[in-house]
Amino acid sequence: MDNPMYKALLEWSLKQNDGTRPAALDPAQLDPEKKAFLERVMSEMVEDESSTMIELVAKLHSKEDTEEEAEAKVDALEELSDRVDRIDYAITLHAYAKGFLPVIHLIRDSKHEGVRSKAAELASVCMRNNPDLQLAALEDGGLATIFQAHGNPENGHNCRAKIVGALSALVQNNKTAEAAFLASGGVEALRGDIVSISSKLKLKALFMLQWLLRDCEAARKAAVAGLANDLETVLSEEDDDATEYAAMCLQALVQGDKGAFDAETLRAKVEQRLNTGTVGSGEAETARDALKQLLGLLK
């Protein structure tokens, strides 16, 4: 489906039929000949898109013994990423092209970091807010697969950040996945990431932790003692985004069990960070707000 006009027509059709807005034109009002033509074009477009995905998925099963072969696989993953920006297309990748689960396995099994990284990115797009593909990944052992990839020492910070993104996309808003993640030591696994020298990896891990601790009581109970210390360390850093997420994590932990904290010591650290004069400066007020909310919980 290389013709931009066809792509635009398909996008328009999906929008008209996704239930979020009334159709601009009742199909019953169409001339029968025009209606038949539109239906034929749409059918051909869907078939063409599915065929293209199948061709791209075939490349994911190819060898990657050379850099050129690995690059070809990365290119196929990138093209698939461009096509699964809607849940409809992600489902097509899984149900028709049989490509979603192979992508999950590439995160762990590929010999090339570039392939592992791009596969994690594609898997994240597919699973985010998509219960069907979250379930498909879980039933295939995808959580264990991605966990193993997360522990691969050959992955650089950028690749590891994308793997954390895949874990987050698999677990968020899925109680079964949350329970499995926690039972596998997920909170402890993220501790090394939140103290990473890589800002990108740190933020990915902190973002996942803040919603997990906020939304899941079991996650708060699973939080190991050292986690709070790690989060307090992050508070003292000059990265406003990291400060904000760390403060939100600590808010959830304090609300869950305030007695587990030395409130006076933590309060002093929060006040010191607020008084640095740099946090939340300019248009970025959210970090300062998060610190103030944490301070309010400690009084």
Image (cartoon, rainbow, N blue to C red):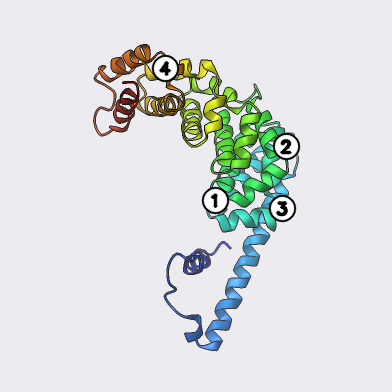
In the image, what residue type sits under mark 1?
Asp
**Dot 4 crowding, Cα within 10 Å, few <14, some 14–19, many 20+:** some
- Label 3 belongs to which residue? 98
**Tag in front: 4 or 2:** 4
The kind of residue tagged 4 is Glu
Q: Secondary structure at mark 4?
A: helix
Q: Residue 225 location, x and y as percent?
A: 53, 16
Q: Which residue is mark 4?
A: 232
State the image coordinates of residue 288 (x, y, percent, origin top left).
29, 27
Q: Inspect this view and state whether residue 272 appears.
A: yes
Question: Of 64 and 232, which appears nearest the observer?
Answer: 232
Contact (Cβ within 8 Å) of mark 4 with mark 2: no
Q: Which residue is mark 2?
A: 64
Q: Earlier in the sequence, mark 4 or mark 1?
A: 1
Using the rendered view, name the quadrant where residue 123 is placed: top right
Q: Which mark is residue 82?
A: 1
Sequence-wise, which precedes: disc 3 or disc 4?
3
Circle nearer the viewer, 3 or 4: 4
Amino acid beneath label 2: Glu
Q: Earlier in the sequence, mark 3 or mark 1?
A: 1
